[in-house]
């Protein structure tokens, strides 16, 4: 699975606002383990359409983020990218918790 996280380079935390994120941290996950990760710039592109297109190009299967607009939710749904919002804290720690199953979603 290829997991994208809206990323704040300064704090190494999940970026608060998906629609204004400057970076994604991309994780390759296999059998419940992080295989590798890479930080990718959004190249100054913002907004639902631009960021969802970028996630398609990065071949993301899912997104973890802080806040997300309804417009972005719709754009990601349209592209078949799963998303999970409401996260904060260190990106690596959150991803480890996510793949370990400590978060529950309805």
Image: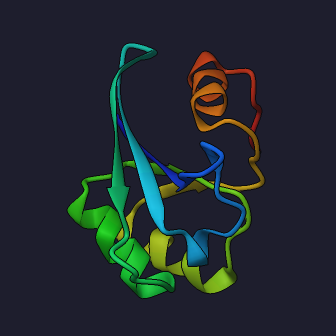
Above or below residue 20? Residue 12 is above
How far from the left and from the top, in percent, is residue 5?
52, 49
How far from the left and from the top, in percent, is residue 86?
78, 54
Q: Residue at the front extreme?
A: 10
Please name the residue shown 33% across and 75% down the image: 43
Q: How many numbered circles are shown?
A: 0
Tell me the quadrant of the picture where the N terminus can be found. top left
Tell me the quadrant of the picture where the C terminus can be found. top right
Residue closer to the observer: 3 or 11: 11
How far from the left and from the top, in percent, is residue 91?
60, 38
Above or below residue 14? Residue 68 is below
Residue closer to the observer: 64 or 73: 64
Above or below residue 2? Residue 24 is below
Residue 82 shown left or right of residue 50 in the figure: right
Please name the colour scheme applied to the rendered image.
rainbow
Please name the residue shown 31% across and 70% down the image: 54
Above or below residue 30? Residue 51 is below
User: Which quadrant would residue 85 be assigned to in this image?
Assistant: bottom right
Residue 46 shown left or right of residue 99 in the figure: left
User: Which quadrant would residue 100 be assigned to in this image?
Assistant: top right
How far from the left and from the top, in percent, is residue 64?
58, 49
Please name the residue shown 77% across and 33% down the image: 104
């Amino acid at each position: 699975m290829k997991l994208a996280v809206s990323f704040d380079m300064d704090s190494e935390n999940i970026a608060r606002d998906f629609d204004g994120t400057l970076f994604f941290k991309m994780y390759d996950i296999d059998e419940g383990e992080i295989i590798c990760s890479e930080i990718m710039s959004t190249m100054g592109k913002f907004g639902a359409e631009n960021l969802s297109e970028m996630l398609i190009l990065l071949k993301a299967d899912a997104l973890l983020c802080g806040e997300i607009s309804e417009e972005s939710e719709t754009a990601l749904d349209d592209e078949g990218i799963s998303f999970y919002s409401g996260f904060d804290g260190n990106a690596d720690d959150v991803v480890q918790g996510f793949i370990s199953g400590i978060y529950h979603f309805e």
